[in-house]
Amino acid sequence: MNEAELQAWVDGRLPPDRQAAVDRYLEAHPEEEARLLAYRAQNEALHALFDDVLTSPVPPKLAPPRSTLPSDGAVLRAPAWSIPGWRRMTAMVAVAVGASLVGGAAGWSLRGARTEAALAADAGSMPRGPALPRQAAIAHAVYSPEVKHPVEVGADQQQHLVAWLSKRLGKQLRPPTLTQQGYELVGGRLLPGDSGPVAQFMYAEASGQRMTLYVSPGQKQNRDTGFRFAQEGNVGVFYWIDGSFGYALSAAVGKGELSQIANAVYEQLQP
């Protein structure tokens, strides 16, 4: 499988006759799948952060001065800091933030609570806490605002979703039922993690508020097995370790409400 086709898979530009072949290849090569999923997550994060900037008008203070043509009809040259320069500057910022995201920084996950400029600054300066809640918060911030594609497989295919994610993570997964808490399963997706694939299940309540459960294998080295809370911007995360798996429940809700739901999740996941 050549790199051009793999990158086309990342961008969703494969022709239909090659999509199935690449899917089979990635299923047989999980390390390659994790690499490409990381690229896809980076692309989605950059779109979430900068699409509004790229499509918005140039700020007046950065726009070139309005001029008239000289009397002899000669064409004026655009100043070096005109619109193309503005776009180049935006692209450079996007690349820098993208590198920070790949490194695991989570400053941009506060999108909606701060301006894009503040998020970009936070991405490089935010203190690094435990990896599990930080990664869960990033994944929540990337996918919970999505309207058309919040999940890869919807709840209408729950049996397939659970079988697929269970196979990829090497453990029989059981997404909890949160109807009594006011949330219904939307679906789930496969994501890249530090030590291989991880799973994300997404839930939503009637108002549209979304909550995600992040399931990560490879936690044997983590001795912090207690029930913990972390705050990443406006996203609260309750997380815990059970054997070699880590679980993190994320939502932009109050700590008390999230705690009650996390306890319900924890009880349902017990054997």
Image (spheres, rainbow, N blue to C red):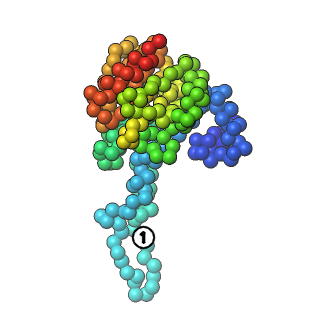
The local crowd at label 1, few if under 14, some if 14 to 19, many if 20 or more residues have their Cα within 10 Å, is few
Q: Residue at x 37, y 63 (%)?
A: 58
Q: Residue at x 33, y 72 (%)?
A: 65
Frontmost residue, 108 versus 246:
246
Q: Quadrant of the N terminus?
A: top right
Frontmost residue, 197 versus 181:
181
Q: Residue at x 27, y 27 (%)?
A: 256
Frontmost residue, 62 versus 162:
162
The reply, left or right, for residue 232 in relation to residue 217 is left
Q: Name the spot of residue 70 as percent of width and height, x first.
A: 40, 83
Amino acid under label 1?
Ala
Q: Point out the residue furthest to the right here.
A: 17
Looking at the picture, does residue 131 appear above or below residue 64? above
Q: Name the spot of residue 33 as percent of width and height, x first.
A: 59, 31
Looking at the picture, does residue 8 appear above or below residue 85? above
Q: How many marks?
A: 1
The picture quadrant where one finds residue 181 is top left
Q: Name the spot of residue 14 as percent of width and height, x first.
A: 65, 45
Is residue 129 visible from the viewing direction of this image?
A: no
The reply, left or right, for residue 17 in relation to residue 77 is right
Q: Residue at x 36, y 69 (%)?
A: 64
Q: Point out the residue furthest to the bottom here.
A: 71
The picture quadrant where one finds residue 161 is top right
Q: Name the spot of residue 182 as percent of width and height, x first.
A: 37, 32
Q: Point out the residue furthest to the front here.
A: 180
In the picture of the structure, the residue carrying the numbered disc 1 is: 78
